[in-house]
Image: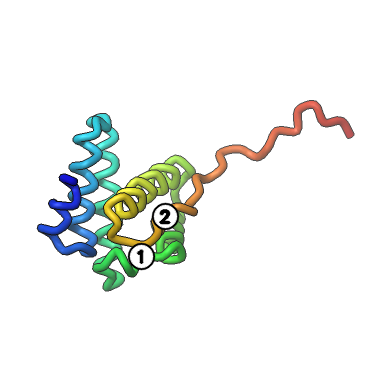
Amino acid sequence: MHENQEVNIVSRDNIKPLIQLCLQTEQDRGLSKNSIIELKRYLNEFSTYCEYQNIYSVKDLTLTFLKDYIDQRCKSAGPNLKKAIVWSLRKFGKHLALLQVVKEDPARNLRHPKFYPRSEIGVEA
């Protein structure tokens, strides 16, 4: 498998090279140019945050850590930014699981924010 050969060249659990490999894989799969730009921006921000927290291995990524990052990054932002960040982290998590560098996708239980409360149309008091 082409991807496994590339992972063997880089550290199997180092966040930065795995992000670069994820970006290349998504580009090869035909993800749009704008989506690649967005994915790169959010994953590079995440990588910087991980370094700041002294997290360098994808094996140290947990659902709690990811949720804390999202909460910190989006504390004064709207749901669109949160949705984009969750999308990016889920792409990265799926990539890690596909390459089998983690036992389970750490982002699999991240959920996109709800934009509007449920409508009460048709409900009479």
Q: Nearer the viewer, residue 1 or 10?
A: 1
Disc 1 crowd rating (10 Å Cα; few below 14, some 14-19, many 20+) is some
- What secondary structure is found at the residue carrying circle 2? loop
**Where does the C terminus fall, quadrant-wise?**
top right
Q: Decide: is 65 above or below 38.
A: below
Q: Residue at x 30, y 71 (%)?
A: 53
Q: Which mark is residue 34?
A: none
Q: Quadrant of residue 50?
A: bottom left
At 52% from the left and 45% from the top, the residue drawn is: 113
Above or below: residue 95 compared with residue 118: below
Camera-side residue of 102 and 119: 102
**3D distance between C-alphas at marks 2 and 1:** 9 Å
What is the x, y in percent for residue 14?
Answer: 21, 64
Q: Which colour scheme appears in the figure?
A: rainbow
Q: State which quadrant residue 60 falls in.
A: bottom left
60 left or right of 117?
left
Q: Which residue is mark 1?
A: 61
At which x and y percent is residue 7?
A: 17, 55
The amino acid type found where label 2 is placed reads Ala
Q: Tell me, yes or no, whether the two marked residues, 2 and 1, touch with CB atoms within 8 Å.
A: yes
Tell me residue 44's x, y (percent): 24, 53
Instruction: Name, please, the residue furthest toward the front.
Output: 1
Q: Residue at x 18, y 46 (%)?
A: 1
The residue tagged 2 is 107
Residue at far left of view: 9
From this view, report whether residue 57 is shown above or below residue 120. below
